[in-house]
């Protein structure tokens, strides 16, 4: 057996086939995500406190992105950001376990002969239909689909030399006799490969080639369900308590599910056999018999076992979900008992963005939008509080304003870095445009924060140097500040609604602020000429006017980014 395992052809085919399979999964997932676009974000937005709705959301999202690990990592990120509570998250992860079984069902069909045509058609659509984005994305998904099945075919061929190895057969017979060993091997393989679907594919290839019994295959599948939870637990390292508890809940209900399924193992196998046609361990004795099936099968293959394995994977997760759905609250409490403590409060943290979801661009883009909206709200609060400071001269505002200005600077840096990382992913041209618009938006919002700081520093200078404005000057500063606040409030509201029909009104606001700045500046110059105003108060006054006008300019730039002109 060792000589076979060390054979160069075996190693190359196994590694190459697995690589093609994983690469195909990645490309197919990215293509499906692009086809889905914002629909995934809307599915997640439909999440309610209803655990059943959460489970449906988990099934839907995982079916779209074809990765339960990606879904659970996203959920951990959402919990860490405070966008989901523990009960909601557990419901979604339960659904994700069912959603991931769709891939196993697909690869269990005998359609490997269509792998090469799928690759050819997929490449054609991807290269020659770029102007029609939907077709190009479909081509990308089809290319991934073809590579996935082509990799599966190569892996099956890699195991051909092992058919004649008595030692290899005895080893897997040992797994069939020792279910715990099979579960352990399945879990370890999944932890190493970091893809439950890849381990299922390897199991299918071994079983279909006649190297695994049905019992051994089921043991490996049960182990894979434990191993896949490791990804979420690794993602939870360094997150808050709720996120770590979500990852732990994922491990607990899979581990508990495997435990009771091992106790009920004979009955579980009988149910699978009852709902799946054919005898799982039926072996084709001759090539003529294999040819009669017409599925590219060979002597020694097991024609029915792949469908049995896929159904095992699906039924286990459906049963486990139905059992745990009513117990979500209890499971949540159990995780709080195991992982004790309270999260320390932080003055600043990213509320929505989590780098763990960068591999799922539609979700990542939605997070960047949310963080940008939050940044806009903070800028609006800064304008309002700066105006209040100018009106009442109370220095209690300064400490709050300084903290908010620091937060805006940090948000600008973090959101920009996140958007740069997102732009390096495989994203559509439309998403690239939106990423660029958001970059412009956060930069202009940061500049609004800077001009607010300039205004309150001028206010402090006015206090320290005992500078007094005339009643007319105070009224004019209050007026342009009000116009600026109204403009920014209108645009931030439009950003939150996603309203792109605001350009005409934005132009009206912009012109009104520019006109006010010019009118008040000229009026001040006239007062200087008549001796009504002194030079030093005039310099502070002009700088304040200019700063409010610049806030209006940057607000207008935010408008252009919103409507897609920037």
Image (tube, helix red, strand yellow):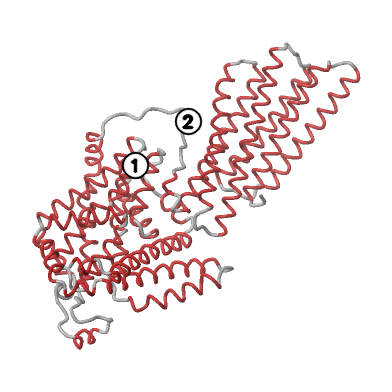
Report the disc number at residue 236.
Answer: 1
Residue that lies at the very extreme toward the right in this rendered image: 530
Residue at 36% of width from left, 52% of height from top? 71
Would you identify the image quadrant in which residue 319 lies?
A: bottom left
Q: Position of residue 251 (x, y in %)?
A: 24, 47
Look at mark 2 in the image and give the residue it sits on: 348
Tell me how many marks there are. Answer: 2
Q: Position of residue 248 (x, y in %)?
A: 26, 42
Residue at 67% of width from left, 37% of height from top? 487
Residue 344 vs residue 340: left or right? right
Residue that lies at the very extreme toward the top in this rendered image: 466
Residue that lies at the very extreme toward the bottom in this rendered image: 288
* Vertical position of residue 8 compared to residue 423: above or below: below
Q: Nearer the viewer, residue 322 or 437?
A: 437
Would you identify the image quadrant in which residue 170 lies?
A: bottom left
Q: Nearer the viewer, mark 2 or mark 1?
A: 1
Q: Position of residue 83 (x, y in %)?
A: 41, 41
For the N terminus, the quadrant is bottom left
* Vertical position of residue 403 compared to residue 311: above or below: above
Q: What crowding class fits label 2: few (fewer than 14 Cα within 10 Å), some (14-19), or many (20 or more)?
A: few
Q: Nearer the viewer, residue 164 or 304?
A: 164
Q: Position of residue 210 (x, y in %)?
A: 18, 73
Residue 3 vs residue 114: left or right? left
Cβ atoms at labels 2 and 1 below 8 Å apart: no
User: Cα distance, mark 2 to mark 1?
Assistant: 20 Å
Q: Nearer the viewer, residue 41 or 247?
A: 247
Residue at 69% of width from left, 44% of height from top? 505
Question: Helix or strand or loop: what does disc 2 sit on?
Answer: loop
């Amino acid at each position: 057996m060792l000589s076979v395992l060390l054979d160069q052809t075996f190693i190359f085919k196994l590694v190459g086939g697995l690589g093609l399979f994983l690469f195909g999964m990645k490309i197919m997932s990215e293509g499906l995500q692009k086809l889905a676009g914002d629909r995934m974000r809307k599915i997640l937005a439909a999440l309610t406190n209803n655990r059943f709705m959460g489970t449906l959301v988990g099934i839907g999202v995982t079916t779209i992105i074809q990765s339960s690990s990606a879904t659970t990592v996203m959920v951990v990120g959402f919990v860490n950001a405070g966008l989901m509570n523990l009960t909601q998250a557990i419901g979604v992860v339960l659904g994700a376990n069912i959603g991931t079984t769709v891939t196993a069902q697909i690869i269990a069909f005998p359609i490997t002969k269509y792998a090469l045509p799928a690759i050819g058609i997929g490449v054609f659509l991807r290269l020659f239909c770029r102007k029609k984005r939907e077709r190009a994305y479909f081509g990308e998904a089809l290319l991934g689909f073809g590579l996935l099945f082509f990799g599966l075919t190569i892996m099956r061929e890699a195991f051909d030399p092992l058919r004649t190895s008595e030692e290899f057969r005895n080893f897997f017979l040992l797994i069939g006799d020792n279910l715990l060993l099979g579960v352990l091997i399945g879990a370890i393989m999944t932890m190493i490969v970091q893809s439950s679907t890849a381990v299922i594919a390897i199991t299918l290839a071994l079983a279909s080639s006649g190297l695994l019994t049905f019992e051994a295959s089921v043991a490996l599948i049960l182990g894979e369900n434990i191993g896949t939870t490791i990804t979420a637990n690794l993602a939870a390292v360094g997150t808050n308590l709720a996120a770590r508890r979500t990852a732990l809940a994922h491990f607990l209900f899979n581990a508990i599910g495997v435990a009771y399924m091992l106790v009920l193992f004979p009955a579980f196998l009988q149910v699978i056999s009852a709902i799946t046609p054919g005898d799982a361990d039926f072996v084709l004795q001759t090539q003529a018999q294999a040819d009669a099936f017409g599925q590219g099968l060979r002597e020694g293959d097991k024609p029915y076992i792949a469908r049995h394995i896929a159904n095992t994977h699906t039924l286990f997760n459906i049963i486990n979900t139905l059992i745990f759905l009513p117990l979500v609250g209890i499971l949540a409490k159990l995780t709080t008992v195991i992982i004790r403590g309270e999260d320390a409060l932080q003055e600043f943290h990213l509320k929505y963005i989590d780098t763990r979801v960068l591999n799922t661009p539609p979700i990542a883009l939605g997070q960047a939008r949310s963080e940008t909206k939050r940044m806009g709200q903070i800028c609006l609060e800064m304008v309002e509080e700066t105006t209040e400071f100018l009106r009442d001269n109370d220095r209690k505002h300064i400490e709050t304003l300084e903290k908010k200005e620091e937060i805006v600077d940090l948000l600008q840096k973090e959101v920009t870095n996140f958007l740069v990382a997102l732009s390096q992913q495989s994203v559509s041209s439309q998403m690239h445009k939106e990423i660029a618009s958001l970059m412009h938006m956060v930069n202009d919002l940061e500049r609004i924060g800077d001009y607010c700081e300039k205004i309150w520093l001028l206010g402090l200078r006015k206090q320290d140097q005992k500078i007094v404005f005339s009643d007319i000057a105070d009224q004019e500063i209050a007026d342009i500040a009000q116009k600026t606040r109204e403009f920014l409030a209108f645009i931030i509201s439009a950003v939150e609604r996603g309203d792109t029909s605001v350009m005409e009104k934005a132009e009206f606001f912009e012109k009104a602020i520019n006109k006010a700045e010019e009118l008040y500046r000229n009026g001040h110059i006239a007062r200087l000429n008549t001796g009504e105003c002194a030079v030093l108060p005039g310099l502070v006054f002009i700088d304040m006017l200019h700063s409010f006008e610049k806030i209006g300019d940057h607000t207008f730039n935010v408008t252009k980014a919103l409507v897609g002109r920037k």
